[in-house]
Image (tube, rainbow, N blue to C red):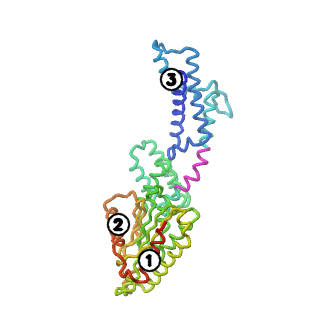
Amino acid sequence: MKAALDYGLVAMFGVLVGASELVSRYRDAPWSAIKNPASAAYVSVNAIAAAATLALLRIFDVTFDIPDATGQRAVQVLVSGFGAIAVLRTSLFIVQVGGRDVGVGPATLLHVLLFATDRDVDRRRAKQRAKAVSDALRGLSYTDVGEALPNYYLTLMQNVPDSEQAELRQRLKEIADSTMEDALKVNAVGLTLMTVVGQRVLEAAADTARTRLLERGVLGEVYPRLREAIDRVTRPDDRVLDVLGLTLYTAWPNVRAWLDDHTCLLDGWTIRMRMVDPDILAGPLRHWFDPHWLDEVRGVLEDVRRYVVENEESLERRGVKLTITTYALVPVVHGFRTGGGTYFISFGRWDDKTGELGRPYQSYEYLPPDDHSPRTCQYKAIFDNWLRRADQVPPTSSGSLMARDNQSVATEATAH
C-alpha cells in the first residue's frame, strides 16, 4: 500500500513537472498546450521517468544515509519526482549529423516530443489566434495600434521582464519597418502582443484604445460593433439586449437578421425593444417629427407582431424572449445596452433646416463593459435613467387602436 502511494506521488510530480514546462512555452494560451496528444505523451514520459527513477533507487537501495525509514521514503519520492528532469535531459554520447553535434539519449526523445507538441499547438492555435486578433482590433488602423497600444499594454502588465520588453519592442520595430500593408501590420502587432499579454488583455485594451465615437450613427459601425458585443457575452444571465429606439426602422431589421442567423447568435437571449408611441407622433407635437416616422412605427409594430406569431414555436424552443413596447416621451436619449455592460448611446438633435427631430445618423458613443471611469459611468447612468422612464410612462392613449396592438405584441412575444 505504501509503495503504491509512493509511486502515485512520484508520477504526479512527474506530470506536474512536464505540464509546467509546456505551460511556460505558450504564454498567450498556456492551458491549450496540454490539450493535445503530443503533450499528453510528453507528460506521460515525465511521469514514467519519475516512477522508473524511484524503482532504481529502491533496487539499488539508495538511502541517502538517512537512518529513518520514513525519511528515506520521503527523500526518495522527492528526488525521483523532481530529479527525473535531469535524467530525461541527459545525452549518453554525441554524434555529428550534418556538421552539427547531436546528443543521443533520453534527451533526444524529449526533444522529439517537444517538437511535435510545438507543431500541434501551432496548428491548432493559428486559426484561433488570427480570428481573435482580427476581431479584437477591428476598426483600428496601424496609426492607432503601432505605438500607443504596445505602450498601453506594457503599462497594464506590471511584471514583464526588461529582456522580454526589449524583445517585444525589437519585434514591433521589425513590423514597423516592413513593407506589409497596414491591415497586415495591425494583425502582426496584435499577434505579437497576444503572445505576451494573452487574448483577454488584448481584447480589453483594444476596446479601450478603440475610438468611442462611432461616426455616421446607425449607418456606420454601430450594428457591426453591437453584434461583436453580443457575440462576446458568455454568461446566461447577461444575455439581455435592451433597445431604446425611435422608430426601430434600422434596429428591428438587424435584430431580426440576428434572430434568423444560422450561428444562433441570439439563442437564449431576452430582447426588449422600445419605440416612440404612435400617439406622440400623431398628436399635438407631430410637427416636431418627420411625417414618415408614424408609418415606420406602425410598420415595425405590425412586422414584429407577425414575426412572433409565425415563429412562436421556434422562439420558445431556442429560449428567445422578444418584446416590443412604446413610450410616451420625446426621444432625447436612445441606443442599446447588453446585460454584459456594453452600451451604445446617442442623443437627439434638431434639424436646423426643418425644425424636426433628426434621425440618429450623426454619431453614437460606444461604452465598453470594463470601463468604470466617472465619465463613462455617468453616460451609462443617463441611459439607464431614460430606459427606466420609458418603461414607467404609459402610452398617451391606452384605448387607441395602436396601443391595443402594441399590448398584444408584447403579450404574445412574452408568452414563452
Of 106 and 253, nearer the camera is 253
Pointer 1 local density, CA inside 10 Å: few below 14, some 14–19, many at least 20: many
**x%, y% of residue 59?**
58, 16
Per the rendering, the mark at residue 384 is 2
Q: Which residue corresponds to mark 1?
A: 406
Residue type highlighted by circle 2: Asp
In the image, what residue type sits under mark 3?
A: Val
The vertical placement of 148 against 313, above or below, is: above
Dot 2 or dot 3: first in sequence order is 3
* Residue 333 visible in the picture: yes
Read off the magenta span: 120-132
How much space separates mark 1 and mark 3, taking CA atoms?
74 Å
Q: Secondary structure at mark 3?
A: helix
Q: Is residue 213 above or below residue 354?
A: above
Element on which disc 2 rests: helix
The residue pinned by badge 3 equals: 77
Neighbor class of circle 3 (other Cα within 10 Å; few <14, some 14-19, many 20+) is many
User: In 3D space, how far apart are the residues under numbered discs 2 and 3 (Cα atoms)?
Assistant: 61 Å
The x, y position of residue 296, in whole percent, is: 47, 81
Residue at 35 percent of width and 66 percent of height: 384
